[in-house]
Structures are given as structure tokens and as C-alpha cells.
Image (tube, helix red, strand yellow):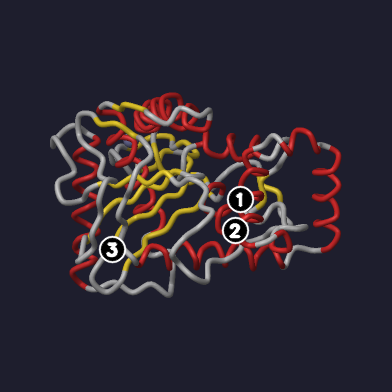
Amino acid sequence: MERTCAFCGKQAELMQSHVLPAFVFRWLRKRSGKGHLRHTDKPNVRVQDGIKQPWLCGTCEGHFGQYETAFATKVFHPWHGGDYRIPYREWMLKFAVSVSWRVLKYARGRNPDATYSEEQNRLMDEAEARWRAFLDGEVPHPDKFEQHLLIFDFVEKTSFDDLPNNFNRFMTGAVTLDIVGSGESLMTFAKMGRFMIFGIIQKGPNRWEGTKLHVRDGLLKPGKFVLPAGLIDLFRQKASFVSAAMAEMSDTQRAKIDKRVQENLDEFAASDQFAAIMADADMFGVDAVISKYLMDKS
Ligand SMILES: [Zn+2]
């Protein structure tokens, strides 16, 4: 059946497109050794893949796929392998915009509790059009609808109080997306493990430093970053949500997971997920992590 492609508007057979790139979900599955994905909303349900939508034609899916491959092979996997100085070219901003465009398209209107001002609704239309024009090569840059990238590494100490005790696991492991903001700021938020992409829709009074992606080239490396203060509340809230969803997991399900981890203990001990659990144990105490191995699965 032919339908309208959400990106180019042509009539075509639509692909089942990932809202967030498929390589992220492959990584997530491998991350805990022989792990399987579970939906945060329904922790007892195993899912083989992330959210998919029938919305792009084969040509558009192919374009997005090129940026995804560049980001996966040049940034995402090398960084996990310990390469913390990564130069990037034009593909980086294209990838970020393609992600932000998808998040906006998918998340807008999906949360019944979210209310937007008239100006914010207008800006969402503008951002969507500008990002599409940039991806199409009609305009040279996203203009005021900037892209910011934050790469999170484990924290042992922080100046913030009241962080949920799965904070490191959430920040390094969870995969999630949303449109976030306040009365005077708005942005898309895509979290792919420790990589977080923010697509600015309404900048507001927020200060960002060291996170903006450039059009032509740049260098990704650890450093000092300034983020809007409200984001820590967002992270805290989302991490608590994962924690609460996992706490509702049935005993049978929990026992199965414990058994699987015990059977694959060597593999698990070497995994990135184990490192995140240890970071939480250092920061919040061992009680905070026992029998909660999979809290950061999204
Ligand atoms: Zn298309």
C-alpha cells in the first residue's frame, strides 16, 4: 500500500523506520552480555527492537541511514572502545538534525499532559521545516534551531543533591526520547546511551557551553560543559521513572534475570553495564544496586 512519506511527502511504500537508530538498540542488547531489551513501560515484556513507525520511503530511509552509519562507526563505537578524541565532519550535524527531526515528529502531541504556548507551536513548525530543509541541502545550517551534543561519563561526585541511585546507569545506559522544556524554552531530547542530542526549538534564557555542534567540523572530547540547570531535573525525573518501572517487575521475571546474569557472570563483569552499576555503588552505596541489575534498560 502506498502512503505519504513523512519526510519528502512522496507517495511510496513506507519502511518501518526506527525513531532512534537501530545501531543503538543492537548496542543495548549486547551491553549486558546476553541481554535482551525490556520496555521501561512494561518491564516484563521483552522487545527485540526500539520503537518503529511506518513513515519514511526507502530513499529517505537510505539518507538517514548514511548519517547513522557515519555516527555509529566514527563516534559511537570508538568512544565506547576508549577513543575520547574524535574529530567530526559535516555528517555529525546532519545526523543530529535527523535525530531531532524524528524526535519532534514522533513525540509532538503524544504526551497529553504537555501544553505548549502559541509561540512554541509556531516554533515547532518552523524547526521542523528548517531541519528538513537543512537535511535536503536547501539551507546551509539549522539557524537558531541549533544542535547540542553531550557525552556523559560516570560521576562519582556531584554538587547536586537527591540524585536517584540508578543515576549512572540511567545516564550511560538508557535510551529514550522526548520534547522537553518550560514556559519559555523548548527542545527535543534524544538519549542514546551516554550520547544525548538536544535540538533547540526555543532557546529561552538557557546557557549552553561547549556542546554546540558545528556545521563543517569539530572535535569531540571530554571537558567542561555548561548545561541549562533545568536539565538535571529532567535527568533525575527520567531516571526515577525507570527505577519505579523496574521496581514493579514481577518476582518471577526478576528471578529469571538474576539467573541469567549469574550464568554469564564473566561476560557481565566485563560489560559496560557492570561498570555503570559499580559507579552507582560507589556513589550511592551497595544497597542501592543489589538485585536491580537491569534498572537502566529502556
Ligand atoms: Zn521520502
What's the residue at 80%, 57% (across, down)?
Answer: 254
Q: Is residue 211 above or below residue 220?
A: below
Q: Is residue 292 visible?
A: yes
Q: Looking at the image, which residue is at 75% across and 63% down?
A: 249
Q: Which sits in the foreground, 65 or 290? A: 290
Left or right side of 178 for 279: right
Q: Is there a contact, CB below 8 Å, between mark 2 and mark 1? A: yes
The span from disc 2 to disc 1 (Cα, nearest Å) is: 6 Å
Tag 2 residue: 283
- Image coordinates for residue 223, horizontal then vertical, percent: 35, 43
Q: Horizontal and vertical percent for residue 136?
A: 22, 34
Q: What residue is shown with label 3?
A: 186
22 over 115 or under it: above or below: above
Instruction: Give the crowd class for mark 3: few <14, some 14-19, many >=20 residues within 10 Å.
Output: many
Q: Which residue is mark 1?
A: 279
Q: Are marks 1 and 3 in contact (CB under 8 Å)?
A: no
Work out whether mark 2 precedes mark 3 in sequence or the reverse, and give the earlier one: 3
- Type of amino acid under label 2: Met
For the residue labelled by badge 1, is the local secondary structure a helix, a strand or a loop? helix
